[in-house]
DNA sequence: CTGTTAGCGCCTTCAG
DNA sequence: CTGAAGGCGCTAACAG
């Protein structure tokens, strides 16, 4: 500890002075340039330590045009964000990668127009070198605004029409996931399927549903005719929109029960809704899987903890986070997003006792 | 849209030029100074819009020494952070306040030494004007480091010894909370109490336990002698350390059952552990509350959803977030932390059917 | 009300 | 290997 520390924040100049070198040399040491004598390096490091020196990020960013931070932006209200472990897993994967690149992950919630505006100023203003967006709903303008202002953007999941064209993204094959779930129950003789979708303003919901449709059609069934009594043996599908919450799953299951006589399989587009359905079915005196099979989506920890354990379509969530972060870091280095591309991960059906 | 936009990011200078005014005037308009003619204002605004101008945050921060951002730092691994709704509620309250002050809330996880170092550089470097810390464990050095470098710090909850002296904070009265829980069960005739604490490297756990001790002593009981058979009618307390997770609650409840013959009340220091205890007790064939009363802490949504609904000590979580954010914003404006103080909120017992 | 003039702290050529 | 010098984009006095 030097005689006087703290107080006025140390600057590169003060470090250089107490080390007895020029600012340029001090800068070289602190940025890790090799062209410095060991002697000078040592003295600068000592001075910096004794002064608790931390480089002024603003000054540095002004000249380097980099902040060494990456934003992780979730376009949902806090409740949703926290109640669904989906986000936690993706964030975790992203955090790993960003931290490994020695960058700071800053995490923001955009739930209102005000939030959006503020985030754009923050990010486009230079506080982050790239941004990862999750849960992008129809009409979300932030990604486009950032791109327009030169901030590289990565999306997790396929964005709705018109959000941005041709942005790098990390995604899973939702059609394949829906298909796998439906084929599974059809293969076990289920015929009257009910689907509980996510919010339909996100393509992931549509895609998973599309997968189900394909499976049903391939099995010789009709789609979308919820009412009419289908010939025995011919599969049918009814669809109810949910909201990715447990409570929403309950409501949707109830609606399904009302609309589909003989319902024998429920395909929920996330595990939280599947759990809600499980609860409601039990209350109605139906046994899972004997009377009704239930399949979830995501494979969050809860899926294997409930009774009966949930058959579900596992998404590689952490990997999704890692993938998106890897893209973001690459773009942060490269400047704009000439990168394109991205990757599509494969979901995998995990069969447990609910089906 | 002007003929050429995007491309080279717009600067104040380019805005001023296309508006036909000086940089100073443009700056005045953009920072909301009143001393500008309507005419000039209009032209500058138009120019800025047509160029998609966003002020360079680094340049601005360099001169104003403010970033208009506040950090919300949680010192936990991602899992914990997301699995306990406690954090979500506090974050939500903080987000409200920070957003209302037109600042960006940036949220960071510090789970490793690397994370810590990076955060200190990020925050002390000027990317945020203040930092709110949650879940500060013994030995956490980040708050002190930031203070030393001139960044105002606010703590949620009382910090362990030696983390920082005399930092403004928002807290609840944990002794009162523990006391209320214990008095409640004692008042209903329970005599063999078991406490499942949180991690004991945080004072909140110690404080809640202290509250229980006081209640037991006041009721003429002995404390800490888990083994020996106490005279009938004389209350006793056994203590097991938990980790704030559901699974940890199960384990702790099991340990308690083993160590305390005739156990008739479990006081868990958060709801997640109480739920774990509930599950284990049921498996062991014990009926809640007939055989054993269970009391939780926090009052997260799950508490009222489980069967039987959990009696618990409600913490005003969102208010805790609002309080801490209010302090942080005040400090961000005022510069350093001459503020001190902070406030202590009162928890409240919510009686449901588990006791 | 507006333009001119200085830097904020740092990195980076460019000479030595 | 090191020092001197310039400028990143913006705001804040200071004159006009």
Image: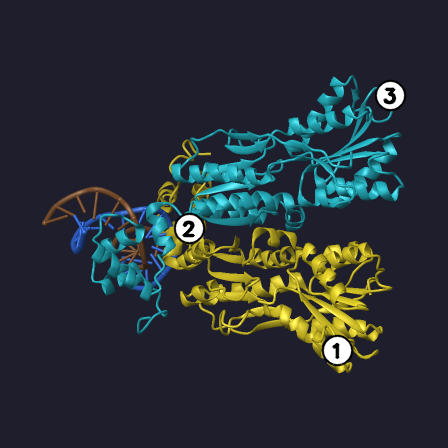
Chain colours: A yellow, B cyan, C blue, D brown
Distance from Cα at disc 3 to Cα at disc 1: 67 Å
Q: Is residue B244 visible?
A: no
Q: What is the x, y in percent for residue A244?
A: 65, 59
Whether tag 1 and tag 2 are in contact, CB under 8 A, the answer is: no
Q: What is the x, y in percent for residue A75?
A: 54, 58
Q: Where B307 falls versus A5 (above or below)?
A: below
Both on one chain, marks 1 and 2?
A: yes
Q: Is residue A325 visible?
A: yes
Q: What is the x, y in percent for residue B39?
A: 21, 58
Viewer-side residue, B156 vs B32: B32
Q: Residue at x 82, y 69 (%)?
A: A262
Task: Tell me the tag on residue B229.
Answer: none
Helix, strand or loop at mark 1 = helix
Answer left or right for A292 relative to A71. right
Task: Tell me the tag on residue A216.
Answer: 1
Task: Tell me the tag on residue B230.
Answer: 3
Q: Where A186 falls versus A248 (above or below)?
A: below
Residue that label 2 marks: A57
């Amino acid at each position: 500890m030097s005689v006087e520390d703290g107080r006025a924040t140390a600057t590169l100049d003060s470090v250089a002075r107490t080390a007895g070198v020029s600012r340029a040399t001090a800068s070289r040491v602190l940025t890790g340039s090799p062209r410095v004598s060991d002697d000078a390096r040592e003295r600068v490091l000592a001075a910096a330590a004794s002064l608790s020196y931390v480089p002024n990020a603003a000054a540095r960013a002004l000249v380097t045009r980099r902040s060494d931070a990456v934003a992780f932006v979730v376009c949902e209200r806090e409740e949703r964000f926290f109640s669904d472990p989906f986000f936690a897993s993706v964030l975790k994967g992203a955090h790993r990668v960003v931290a490994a690149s020695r960058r700071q992950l800053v995490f923001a919630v955009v739930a209102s127009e005000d939030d959006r505006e503020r985030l754009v100023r923050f990010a486009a203003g230079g506080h982050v070198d790239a941004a990862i967006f999750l849960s992008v709903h129809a009409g979300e303008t932030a990604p486009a605004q950032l791109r327009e202002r030169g901030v590289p953007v990565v999306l997790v999941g396929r964005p709705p029409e018109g959000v941005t064209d041709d942005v790098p993204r990390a995604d899973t094959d939702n059609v394949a996931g829906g298909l796998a779930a439906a084929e599974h129950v059809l293969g076990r003789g289920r015929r009257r399927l009910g689907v509980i979708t996510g919010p339909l303003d996100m393509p992931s919901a549509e895609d998973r549903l599309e997968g189900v449709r394909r499976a049903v059609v391939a099995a010789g069934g009709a789609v979308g005719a919820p009412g009419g009594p289908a010939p025995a043996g011919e599969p049918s599908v009814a669809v109810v929109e949910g909201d990715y919450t447990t409570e929403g799953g309950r409501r949707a299951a109830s609606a399904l029960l009302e609309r589909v006589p003989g319902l024998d399989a429920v395909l929920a587009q996330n595990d939280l809704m599947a759990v809600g359905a499980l609860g409601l079915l039990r209350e109605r005196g139906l046994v899972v899987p004997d009377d009704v099979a239930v399949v979830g989506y995501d494979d969050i920890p809860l899926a294997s903890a409930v009774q009966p354990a949930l058959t579900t379509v596992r998404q590689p969530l952490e990997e999704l986070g890692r993938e998106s972060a890897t893209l973001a870091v690459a773009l942060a280095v490269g400047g704009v997003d000439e990168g394109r591309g991205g990757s599509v991960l494969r979901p995998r059906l995990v069969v447990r006792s609910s089906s």
